[in-house]
Image (spheres, rainbow, N blue to C red):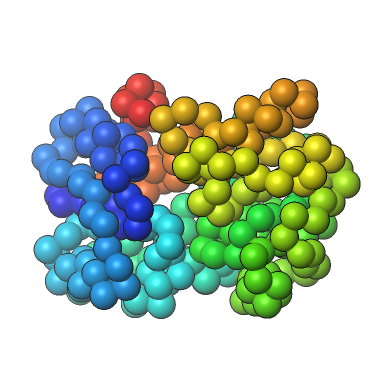
Amino acid sequence: MKLVVLGDPVAHSRSPAIQTAALEACGIQGSYTARRVDEAGMVRAVDEVRYGRLSGANVTMPHKQIAFELADRVSEEALRSGAVNTLAGRGGEVWGHNTDVEGIRAVWRSAALPTDRPVLILGTGGAAAGVVVAVADRALTVSGRRDRAATDLLTRTRAVGSTVPWGTPVEGAVVVNATPIGMNAELLPSSVLDVASGFFDLTYASVESPSIVYTRGLGIPTADGKELLLAQAAASFQIWTGVPAPTDVMRAAF
């Protein structure tokens, strides 16, 4: 079994360590590596899955929407979000899944983030689309660097919500960071975080992001991308192997 994670950047990814540990724990012979790709590289990688040279792949920023377009068949969650983070080969076809959606819901529950508050989503890409689908029953607001991109996100996910300019606070909202901000020690706009009722940072790094540290200091519940990675990685592992993921082993390998 040959697996990869596709993205740009991808050198920071903990997926190879997590998935390699899972394969070894289950006695499955295989490999899992990180591959930095551009759009052309994505096309080639998807063809490798289609023709059996790869058993499957995870997809991370910024290629989740491209992966959706390249897949032959997609799951319901992928269809709603227009984004794919897991690719699997089946009978000469590439199947696309979005395991972020259930992963987001699982982390939201385990972190005890408020479920009765509005949600402010920062970002307009594939990761943000997964958040929209996961919490579509809440009062949603989307904020991006470009207002048109925020509107397009709501349109393509068929979600009801509003948009605000970047940096605009939404009083009492659970703020979800679905941008790369934080991967390189940047802080999100403090005006947005100061009035939040919770904070979910989809990014992760070797140390906690400045925004996680800042919001925890405010005394509000927080969740970070490590827990999301583990949740979606376990779901991806089962899709590829048909075997329940050894989650304790995967967590220890992080």
Tell me how many marks there are. 0
Residue in the image at 80% along x and 56% along y: 168
Image coordinates of residue 25 in percent, x first then y, are 22, 28
- Left or right of residue 73: residue 144: right
Residue 155 image-quadrant placement: bottom right
Quarter of the image where one finds residue 165: bottom right
Q: Residue at x 26, y 75 (%)?
A: 40
Q: In the image shown, does 47 or 145 lie closer to the viewer? A: 145
Determine the residue positioned at 68% across, 77% down. 148
Q: Is residue 182 left or right of residue 47?
A: right
Residue 245 to residue 25: above or below: below
Of all residues shown, which one is farthest toward the right? Answer: 171
**One can see residue 225 in this view:** no
* Quadrant containing the C terminus in the rendered view: top left
253 left or right of 173 in image: left
- Which residue lies at the image location 41% right of the left edge and 77% below the top edge? 69
Q: Is residue 79 left or right of residue 157?
A: left
Q: Is residue 111 above or below residue 50?
A: above
Residue 219 at least partly seen = yes
Residue 177: give x, y in percent of width and height. Answer: 62, 48
Q: In the rendering, at what x and y percent does residue 214 appear?
A: 68, 30
Between residues 53 and 183, which one lies in front from this camera angle? 183
Residue 79 rendering spot, x and y as whole percentages? 52, 71
